[in-house]
Each structure stands twice: as C-alpha cells, then as structure tokens.
Amino acid sequence: MSEIIDTFIAPPCHDRIETLYQDDHLLLINKPAGLLSLSGKNPQNLDSVHHRLVKIFPGCTLVHRLDFGTSGLMVIARNRAVNAALCHQFSQRSVTKRYAALLCGHVNADEGVIDAAIARDPALFPLMSICAVSGKPARSRYRVVERFMRQLADGTELALTRVELTPETGRTHQLRIHCQQLGHPILGCDLYGGLLLPGTRLTGRLMLHASELHFTHPVSGERTEARNPPAF
C-alpha cells in the first residue's frame, strides 16, 4: 500500500475557540473555521483545538473531530473515563449530529437521502472517492431550509441552497463528497467542487458548520441537546 504523505500546512488561525458550556467532566465548544482539531505531525501544524485547550484544561481529550475548514460544535472530554463513555456513544451511533451548509445551485427536492459508499485511496490523498466495491457504507440526509440568490463582491450572482445535513455514518469528508454526489457541492469546498463556479473563490471559507450535537451526558445521564447556529 502506498504511503500517504500529508504536505498540507495550515495558515495561521487568529479566531478564538468559544466555550459554550463546561462542567467538571466535559466542554462544549464552538470551533472556528480554519483551525485543525488535532495537531499534525509537521511542527508547522502545531496549533489546533487540542493544543489550545489542553493548556487551559490539562488532561482534556478529543472525542471526535471536525475538518480544518468546518466550524461549529465539538464535545471535549476532561478525563479518560468520560472520553471512553462518549466515544462509545459515537461508535454506537447514539449521538445525533446536524450541520448547516450552503450548497452551490438550487437543490430541487426539499429533502432526501444520499446513500453512497466512500473509499480512501492513498493515490488520491487527500481526496476520498465514491466506490460501491471498496468503499465503506455512508449515508446522509438533507433538508432544504431556503433557496436564494447571493451577490458576491465582484458582482457575480450565485444561486445557493441553505440545507440541514444529518450524517448517519461518520466517514472522512462524508458531507462534502455526498453533496458533490448530489450535484450541489458545498460552497467554498476546495476538494469537491465548491470553488468551480464564477465568483466562488471569493467565498473565503468552507460553508459547513456543525450546528447541533445531541448526546447523553456520561455522568448525569441527562440528554444534552446543544445548538449553535452558523455565522453564515
């Protein structure tokens, strides 16, 4: 198998991490777009959610990750036991995750399901691919919130659709590649067609935001339903 070599160098992120909730067991944060979840092997990619938070909350660990370009809700465990309990919920798919996104073009159907297996190919890194033969099952739901036109800084008008995305599985780049498969890539997505239309390169970021996270608090047993609307 070919070795995967990651040459990506993250540009500096000057936006701060917003702590939305904290107790002795976990944190709920709003991750800014343009910040790694975990530090990379390259020393130039040291800055990350974990690198920043562990200085304030020693012993904290990541339960899940968001892509570099994705903003929004993350739950952070403050000790190993809580991490294990939350990771179990994620693996059992008892955690509900919802995302807000802006898609290029006007999506015809008001809601639907994208069911397309996703495969990792070292020769295509960092791209993932849709492959029914070697891919792992992947399923996402979408619901249209609104269809509208937006005028960009250069005067270009873009047809956009605001959607709510609910991944039922958690594959790498799942929502990004599934939206491309739908024929409406996420605006600002550099890997899966979201920068191909005229004017889209002025977008400035990936228009994908983790807006809801529902899980059971591993200590209190209470159902936690966190919501954090996007800035776009």
Image: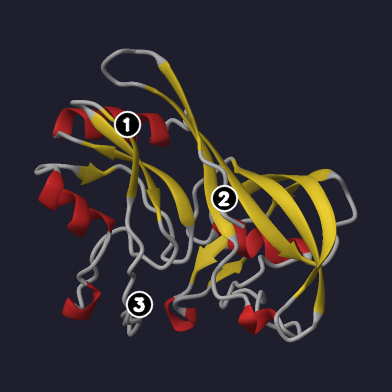
Q: Quadrant of the C terminus?
A: bottom right
Dot 2 falls on a residue whose secondary structure is loop
- Residue 222 higher or lower than 154, as above or below: above
Q: Which label sits on residue 178?
A: none
Q: Is residue 207 above or below residue 76?
A: below
Q: Which residue is mark 1?
A: 86
Task: Give the label, 2 or 3, closer to the camera.
Answer: 2
Q: Residues within 10 Å of mark 2 (few under 14, many from 20)?
A: some
Mark 1 surroundings within 10 Å by alpha-carbon count, few (fewer than 14), some (14 through 19), many (20 or more): many
Is residue 132 visible to the viewer in this orientation of the structure? no
Residue located at (24% from left, 35% from top)? 83
Closer to viewer: mark 1 or mark 3: 1
Mark 3, other Cα within 10 Å: few <14 / some 14–19 / many ≥20: few
Specify how the rendered protein is coloured.
secondary structure
Q: Position of residue 110 (x, y in %)?
A: 86, 45
Instruction: Judge left or right: residue 30 versus residue 212.
Output: left
Q: Classify residue 166 by image quadrant.
A: top right
Q: Amino acid at mark 1?
A: Leu
Q: Name the disc covering residue 1, or none.
A: 3
